[in-house]
Image (cartoon, rainbow, N blue to C red):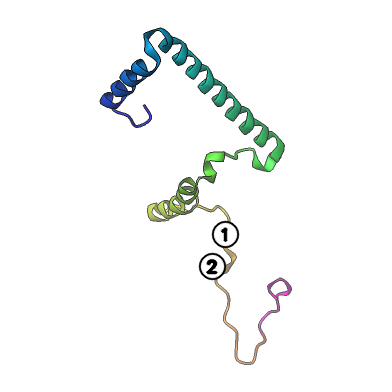
Amino acid sequence: MFGLGWGEALALVVIALLVFGPEKLPQAASQAGRTLRQLRQMANNAKADLQANMGPEFANFDPADLNPKNFVRKHLLDDLENDWNGTSATTTADPVAAPTPELGVGEIPPYDNEAT
């Protein structure tokens, strides 16, 4: 629970009991639960609105992917892991990797309008 052990959780309960008293502690816990539920509902609604308004090309968008650690793991480390396992992360052929025939002496290389 939130990275807390049993000792820390027990200490928090004792402190809450001392601060609020035995009469007001159930009310404070109930209010805290309601607040957490409302915050979770607001976050879920914001996520749903964001996904609905971004369009179909972002249908599988997850805001957690914007976290730098998740972004690096998803876009860099997964590709490296796939390369190590011998599988390709991309499904399209790389045009740069295709072998090109060597030019003969005096031949002019082909001109690519998009490359210049």
Q: Type of residue at label 2?
A: Ala
* Residue under the point 53% across and 53% down: 90
**Residues shaded magenta:** 109-116
* Residue under the point 56% across and 39% down: 63
**Quadrant the C terminus occupies:** bottom right
In this rendering, would 54 be left or right of 81?
A: right
Location of residue 58 by image quarter: top right
Q: Type of residue at label 1?
A: Ala
* Residue under the point 66% across and 36% down: 50
Image coordinates of residue 30 in percent, x first then y, are 48, 13
The residue tagged 2 is 97
Where 57 falls versus 38 (above or below)?
below
Q: Secondary structure at mark 1?
A: loop
Q: Secondary structure at mark 2?
A: helix
Location of residue 99 by image quarter: bottom right
Residue 36 is labelled as none
In depth, the one of 23 and 31 nearer the eye is 23
On whether residue 57 falls in the magenta region, the answer is no
In depth, the one of 25 and 2 nearer the eye is 25
Image coordinates of residue 11 in percent, x first then y, are 29, 23
In depth, the one of 102 and 35 nearer the eye is 35
Mark 1 and mark 2 in contact (Cβ < 8 Å)?
yes
The residue tagged 1 is 93
Name the magenta segment's main secondary structure.
Answer: loop
Image coordinates of residue 70 in percent, x first then y, are 47, 45
In this rendering, would 67 be left or right of 46?
A: left
Question: Could you tell me how far apart the alpha carbons at marks 2 and 1 are, in whole angstroms?
Answer: 8 Å
Neighbor class of circle 1 (other Cα within 10 Å; few <14, some 14-19, many 20+) is few
In the current view of this chain or complex, which residue is farthest to the bottom? 106
